Image (cartoon, rainbow, N blue to C red):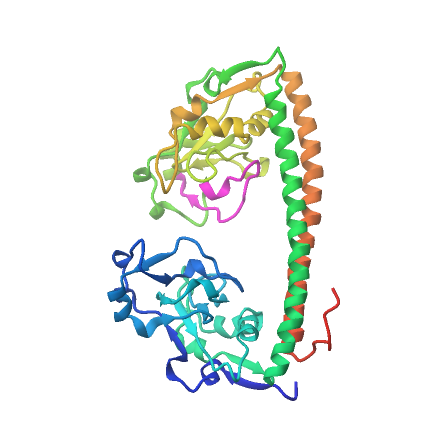
Amino acid sequence: MKDYQKKKLSELSEKKDAVVSGPFGSNLKVSDYKTEGIPILRLQNIGKGYFIEKNIKYISEEKAEELKYHSFIVGDIALAKLGIPIGKTCIIPEHFKSGIITADIVRIRPDTKNVDYKYLEFYLNTDLSVAQLTGNISGATRPRVNLSSVRDIEIPIPPLPEQKRIVAILDKAFATIAKAKANAEQNLNNAKELFESYLQGVFENKGSDWVDKKLEELSDKKKSIVSGPFGSNLKVADYRESGVPMIRLQNIGKGVFIEKNIKYLDTEKAEELKSHSFRTGDIVLAKLGIPIGKTCIIPEHFGSGIIVADIVRIRPNKNNISYKFLEYFLNTKLSVSQLSKNISGATRPRVNLSDVRNIIVPVPPLPEQRKIVLELDALQEETKKLEVIYQQKIDNLEDLKKAALQKAFNGELPEKEIAL
């Protein structure tokens, strides 16, 4: 690294406006957005090393002229100083033309005689760069850094020919890694789709002795299917760090209970809401969110507690149906499609309790249900093993990218290419 010089990002150009951030929110509001005109660059358009051309918004020429200090042009570098991960960076593609950056974006325009833009983009997306920003983060829920922290990022700068050599090697290595990663991701999707396809087929090819029943008909008790209390009856102010556990939407996965960020109630509040209770082994279904109707069984070790709004607790008669069989069915497209017909709400799709109670369930004799569950459990176990293998391959490829970048900016790249 003898030819490398450490320079701050602000030192890569003699111009003061080489590194600028977007206007204050009060200077560019959602009410200024148009469906055509001058494009604006928002946080959701910045990927880690790639530009995301989706949901582009525009402003009028007059507004753009007012905000011209915060402009970008084709080929500029854009960095996100808000969000997780902090500091995502990409080069603005040639076809995107010029426009205005919004708040919490930094536009970077160093001198091309000193810096290869692609080299800089590579570095700004490394852990080495991000680590410099994370020490200056403010905000717990929406972590951000200020413009001066971005300007102070220190970058190892070799001579321009060496930068271009590094870029050429990394481009080639990353193309190979991307291809391998795409194959692994496709294999991962294939493994998941194989199980989903088999699961769907089980219920589409039902036998002549199967009977269609409404979900509410699988129990004789009225309170076998209940939803959580109204929001006014259970508020965030009631949450405790210990006591009687609650199940929230984020705890329900598709066939899996997610035991994370559990909140609690005191015993008095739980007693007040006991009609919305659950116990070990109950089935819970999410009647809000995407995908609608995610369902899982509450594991044995979790005990009892209270469900919150937009969750349905299901407790049918075990003499009528296997709970695991029912969980499998409620996670199929056949079940979800029944709920989808009754969705309300555009931004937060939800269904009501009666829609859940009226789900038609194909029910075979109990011995056949148990046999089907054993077959599905075995296939799911094999599928999970494949998923672990392919996910590990994807993780290894990401680690390989990080290692290649680490070598590049430590001056350790080989003369020609990286061995993959």
Q: Residue 122 at x, y = what percent?
A: 57, 71
Magenta span main SS: loop
Magenta part of the protein: which range? 249-267
Image-based side of 87 in relation to 2, left or right? left
Query: So how many labels did they put on this image?
Result: 0
Q: Residue lying at the far right in this picture: please name it.
A: 419
Q: Residue lying at the far top in this picture: please name it.
A: 209
Whether residue 180 is visible, yes or no, is yes
Query: Vertically, is 14 above or below 408?
Result: below
Q: Quadrant of residue 168?
A: bottom right
Q: Residue 334 at x, y = what percent?
A: 52, 26
Residue at image coords 35%, 69%: 22
Q: Is residue 252 magenta?
A: yes
Q: Quadrant of residue 228?
A: top left
Residue at image coords 44%, 44%: 264
Which quarter of the image is occupied by the C terminus?
bottom right
Query: Vertically, is 88 above or below 228?
Result: below
Image-based side of 167 in relation to 227, left or right? right
Query: Vertically, is 239 above or below 333?
Result: below
Image-based side of 159 in relation to 39, left or right? right
Question: In front here: 347 or 226?
Answer: 347
Which quarter of the image is occupied by the N terminus?
bottom right
